[in-house]
Image (spheres, grey):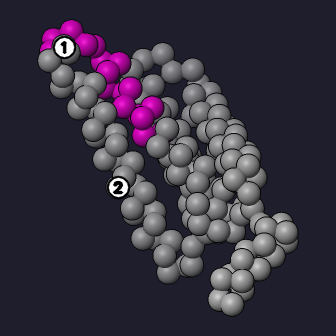
Amino acid sequence: MKYILILTLLLMSVSAGAVTVEDMSEARKQAEFEARAIDKICWNEAFKDKPDTTRAMWAAAVRNTDCLYKEIEKQVKLAFLPQDHEKMMVLIHAAGKNIADIYFEMHTSNRYCYGHCGTMNNITHTVNEMEFLIGVLTDLILMNRIKDSV
């Protein structure tokens, strides 16, 4: 009897329009599309002055990541209770910094780099941090869209 009840409930949830794997896959694609569109807006704004020095490119990259963090914070405020907003942002900032630090070291402290890598390797790690942030933004957009954990 117990198994019949479970099977009945399962069939009812499927027939009632439960989210399928295909639906979830499509929803994730849409969320990633939105996150990348947001990143493009942030990027275009951050790089609108067309930086032509390493220092200017670094400053633009920082503006871009700041913009992504602000967009993530908007999604965090939708997805989490007010008492959890700050905790989530602290965790996301810490993870982003750790990723940036790992890639900074990979790009600048490897045996092939000593004395000849140039200054561009000092800013390329920001791309890795941005990709991480786009992933977080994608998951948050998806979470807020489907109203469930992803």
Q: Quadrant of residue 50?
A: top right
Q: Quadrant of the C terminus?
A: bottom right
Q: SS of the residue at dot 1? A: loop
Q: Quadrant of residue 103?
A: top left
Residue 64 vertical position relative to residue 21 in the rendered view, above or below? above
**Which disc is residue 74 wearing?**
none
In percent of width and height, residue 30 lies at 73, 45
Residue at mark 1: 112
Q: SS of the residue at dot 2? A: helix
From this viewpoint, is residue 124 visible?
yes
Crowding at mark 2 (Cα within 10 Å: few <14, some 14-19, many 20+): few
From this viewpoint, is residue 38 visible?
no
Residue at mark 2: 94
- The residue that appears at 51% across and 21% down in the rendered structure is 51
Three-letter code, disc 2: Ala
* Closer mark to the observer between disc 1 and disc 2: 1
In percent of width and height, residue 108 lies at 23, 24
Crowding at mark 1 (Cα within 10 Å: few <14, some 14-19, many 20+): few
Is 10 displayed left or right of 133 in the figure?
Answer: right
Residue 113 vertical position relative to residue 12 in the rendered view, above or below? above
User: Which of the two labelled residues, at mark 1 and mark 2, occupies the earlier sequence position?
Assistant: 2
Q: Quadrant of the N terminus?
A: bottom right
- The residue that appears at 45% across and 25% down in the rendered structure is 57
Q: Nearer the viewer, residue 137 or 93?
A: 137
Span of residues in magenta:
114-130
Name the outermost residue toward the bottom: 1
- The residue that appears at 23% across and 32% down in the rendered structure is 105
Is 118 displayed left or right of 63 in the figure?
Answer: left
